[in-house]
Amino acid sequence: MKKLTLLILLVIVSLKSFSQIDTTRVSLEEQIARLVIKDLIEGDGAKKELSITLEKVSLLNQKIVLKDSIINTNTQQISNYNSIVSQKDSQVIMFQNLSDELQNDLRKQKLKNKMTITTSIIVVVLMLLTGN
């Protein structure tokens, strides 16, 4: 392991390396340098503000999608409730009609019973009158 470390160290030391010898300097007046720094700071702030604004837009879009899904669900529920109400209304009408028919049938049956009783009484009375 020591030999490997020594070998790596020798290879690194023997490599030619370049350094930055020539550097250019730009000299600005103090007032212009202040304006440049101010613009750079404003640009950095604008970049941060843009990223925050994009996050807000993304969140707002997610909220809109969520609200749309809630609205669609509520619309479907309202439609289902309206359908249930209309079915119940039709059932009430059907039961009312059935009740009316049964009432009429009951009246007819009562009338038949009265007629039958009256007829049988008349027949008994006639038989008693004619039989004696």
Image: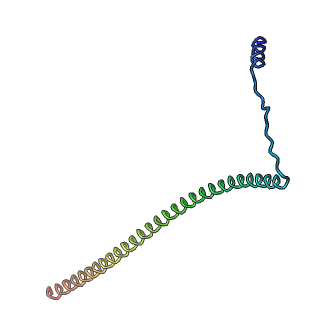
Residue 106 falls left or right of residue 63: left
Left or right, 15 with reference to 68: right
Q: Is residue 111 above or below residue 65?
A: below
Which residue: 82% across, 50% down?
28
Q: Nearer the viewer, residue 98 or 77?
A: 77
Residue 57 image-quadrant placement: bottom right
Q: How is the image coloured?
A: rainbow
Q: Is residue 106 above or below residue 63?
A: below
Measured from the top left, where is residue 42 in percent x and y?
76, 55
Residue 124 in percent (x, y) is at 20, 83
Image spot of residue 107 (x, y percent): 30, 80
Q: In the displayed image of the protein, which residue is found farthest to the right?
A: 30
Left or right? Give the position of 81 relative to 101. Answer: right
Q: How many marks?
A: 0
Quarter occupied by the C terminus: bottom left
Among the 4 quarters of the image, the one containing residue 20 = top right
From the viewer's side, name the closer residue of 34 and 8: 34
Depth check: 130 or 75 in front?
75
Instruction: Farthest residue to the top: give it.
Output: 3
Give the residue at x 85% y 53%: 30
Q: Residue at x 39, y 70 (%)?
A: 91
Q: Residue at x 28, y 78 (%)?
A: 109
Residue 66 image offset from top left, x and y in percent: 57, 58
State left or right for residue 31 relative to residue 124: right
Residue closest to the far left: 130
Q: Quadrant of the N terminus?
A: top right
